[in-house]
Image (cartoon, helix red, strand yellow):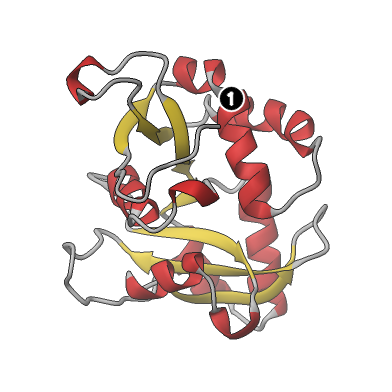
Amino acid sequence: MSPVGINTTPLLVELSAQELRRRLTEALAIYVEAMDYPKGTEFHRAPMWTEHTHRPGWRAVAAVLPAGDDPATATETETMVGIAYGYRGAPHQWWHQQVREGMYRSGADERRIHEVLGDYFELTELHVSREAQGHRTGEALLRKLLEGRTESHVLLSTPEVEDEDNRAWRLYRRLGFTDVVRHFTFTGDNRPFAVLGRLLPLPSDGAENAHSPG
């Protein structure tokens, strides 16, 4: 991946399912780096990401650096430096079932679980390469991805970090995401994760309007 200049602001492009499948190697490289997974994880995740493109409400947005100086002439030679995608949550999905179990174990009753899991967009992945960070690219990707969504709220999971001290946590808190489940271990990953959520739509850029889901 080409290094990103300090003054370079990536462009946002919406990806069709076919485009994401074609550029899956690029997207998964960003994902593995951002999540600090061991090399080779991408081969196990590729089928899952491909399957996700068939789910109702699926949408993906990428951050790219155009090959030339003129963004209007950007071609397939763009370098991908960020990826975000998600889809409408549903009871038969693995993540939905895991979160439901996590909420139940944390003491949530059926009413609360239904409020949170009854109508949501799952922000499945949001990652920016290390070289491209510092331009609010993650926020731009998130806003673009959630633009015009009809679900009542959005949910996501992110690894727990001490004092919530990383870019992802600061972004989610700044945009009003609140706790749904904390210190939850998903099947297949031994790190503790937090599940966060907020009502949709997002506040306009610069506004403060934090709401918990449900």
Placement of 92 over or under 108, stated as above or below: above
Q: Residue at x 40, y 53 (%)?
A: 138
Quadrant occupied by the C terminus: bottom left
Check disc 1 and report its element: helix, strand or loop. helix
168 sits to left or right of 43:
left
Q: Which residue corresponds to mark 1?
A: 24
Q: Classify residue 120 by image quadrant.
A: bottom left
Numbered marks: total: 1
User: Residue 121 appears at what percent x and percent y?
Assistant: 42, 50
- Residue at image coords 47%, 39%: 83
Q: Is residue 12 visible?
A: yes
Relative image position of residue 143 (x, y in whole percent): 29, 51
In-front residue for pair 90/194: 194
- Considering the image in quadrants, where does the N terminus appear? top right
The amino acid type, in three-letter code, at marker 1 is Leu
Q: x and y percent of residue 92 in the render?
A: 63, 43
- Between 129 and 183, the one nearer to me in the picture: 129
- Confirm whether residue 126 shows in the render: no
Residue at image point 30% right, 36% down: 12
